[in-house]
Amino acid sequence: MAFLILAPSSRTSAWEKEIRKAEPDLDLRVWPDTGDPDDVTFALCWKHPPGVLNRFSNLKCIASMGAGVDHLLQDPALPEVPIVRVVDPSMARSMTEYLLMAVLFRMRQLDRYWQDRLQRTWHPRVPEQAASVRIGIMGLGQLGSDAAQAFFSLRFPVSAWSRTPKTAEGIDTFCGEADFAPFLSGLRVLICLLPLTDRTRGILNRHTFEMLPDGAYLVNSARGEHLVEEDLIAALDSGKLSGACLDVFHTEPLPREHPFWGRPEITITPHISSLTNPKAVCPGIVDNYRRMKSGLPLRHLVDRQRGY
Amino acid sequence: MAFLILAPSSRTSAWEKEIRKAEPDLDLRVWPDTGDPDDVTFALCWKHPPGVLNRFSNLKCIASMGAGVDHLLQDPALPEVPIVRVVDPSMARSMTEYLLMAVLFRMRQLDRYWQDRLQRTWHPRVPEQAASVRIGIMGLGQLGSDAAQAFFSLRFPVSAWSRTPKTAEGIDTFCGEADFAPFLSGLRVLICLLPLTDRTRGILNRHTFEMLPDGAYLVNSARGEHLVEEDLIAALDSGKLSGACLDVFHTEPLPREHPFWGRPEITITPHISSLTNPKAVCPGIVDNYRRMKSGLPLRHLVDRQRGY
């Protein structure tokens, strides 16, 4: 019975520390020092090399270090064992704070004032007020619900779109493909918080942008692959979109030659909208490890078919 | 009985339109076309030339176009008639949205990411979360109360300091000079929303900054004269303050040669934190005009001694 941390591109010292704190007697191993692969029953993963999980013949559970599990499901040779993800209310809060920032600085045109200061130019612009800025949130899971409530409490009109029907106090909810156009048609700001699945890959594309009002603003803090990057450039060039705030990209770090760097309408943040805090999530991960050992039902199970 | 608009540096067409809408039969005059000065009984002012109000021997009330009245009280020859100010809940809301933006973008270090993008540099920094960022608001009137409640609802710890004792749900309140040091000692962000009076002029000075924890952040969206500008530069140089977001300045527009332009730690906005909306406030101004005519008590009277 060994617990393996398998995250070759991440610094794992904080994870090790928090897992040991939660379960001091654990047989903890860190990739690539796995010891006898047959000992490993539980693997905590982030962007593992595809195929390597098959080395562990006694693997009984795979846990994701983040809220998203697309990095796991992209492995065509992923072992057929249960997958669990982390759930951390403070991650949702961190995301909400990022989204409020993205919307508020755009309403105040702080991006333009930052451009102005390079020329030492004083050029006031009338700010937008929350009551006239309809926010549209794609995805109404843990992250989307927290964000929707925060925007609503600050008196923004809020719409939300999800795969299955959901309701939330004060929020205009839309669901499924038939509702997609009506959802988009009234928005000033479109926020993507969807999980990355085969259905949602590339959902931020020219057809979606065409259904938005002219001059709408895009915020993507889900996954880079939700966005068709060349369609965003075209929508900015045509004026269909007025700008975007992006925290995620097809390739991270964003390459120096990428056209997004040269567009002042695009605010770029380096994937900092919501960082997983090992201290907050390790107790839940260790709880799932114990449940696996005892044969109890796992928490926060991922539906492979659905993709999240 | 004539109603005079006296705002030489402002465009007044929206004000004229909204005042006519509220009282179509009004004898409305716009400076400098005052007609017979003895007709004028009510003057709606913004930055009037000092002394000119004495030309109107039958003046019975002076109204400020904005929430602040320091532009009136700075006139040593101001006639001894009642002064009223405007109160507009949407102005408070606009200020609150500005303050949330200022704090949230600082927590995410968006100012640094804006610097990074000039070099096309990808450099993630761990964001602060609301629960660890204590906000301190100077001034707990209409603006301060609205802001305090909004920060509290987003789970920031909030302190507020006012001249007279006040209480507000969820807010740690401090009052008077004896409480000033304890108020300042625990803050991550200091926000000034005070009225400008003889007591508050220059209150953002080196002695105040010294009582803050190292690395605190300053937001001033009240009046430029609250801040001793050279003390801010010194506090940034010493690291006492980590940065500032300023919407108001001693001289506006901020002169091209002003040292603030050259400091990336200072975010500069051109006095847009809260613009008075003529549509929202003109009905209240005309209500006070009618009250004056009928001898009824005026609303939102200013206390000259107090200065607001």
Image (cartoon, coloured by chain):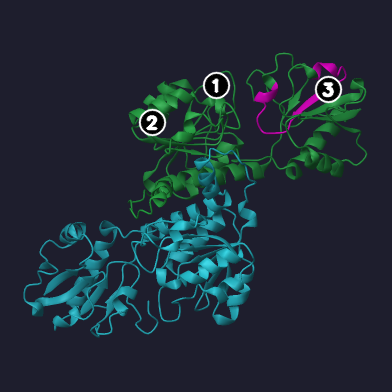
Chain colours: A green, B cyan
The chain holding disc 2 is A
Q: Residue at x 33, y 53 (%)?
A: A123
Pointer 3: what residue?
A60
Tags 2 and 1 in contact by the CB under 8 Å rule? no
Pointer 2: what residue?
A236
The amino acid type of the residue labelled 1 equals: Arg
Residue B189, position as x, y percentages in the image: 57, 62
Q: In which quarter of the image is residue B9?
A: bottom left
Q: Quadrant of residue A178?
A: top left
Give the residues drawn in magenta, as a range. Answer: A53-72
SS assignment at label 3: loop
The amino acid type of the residue labelled 3 equals: Lys
Residue B162, position as x, y percentages in the image: 51, 74
The chain holding disc 3 is A
Q: How far apart are marks 2 and 1 (CA)?
A: 21 Å
Q: Is residue A165 left or right of residue A66?
A: left
Q: In this view, does B191 lie above or below B293?
A: above
Q: Distance between the residues labelled 1 and 3?
A: 29 Å
Tags 3 and 2 on a common chain? yes
Mark nearer the viewer, 1 or 3: 1
Q: Which residue is drawn at 35% across and 70% down?
A: B68
SS assignment at label 1: loop
SS assignment at label 2: helix
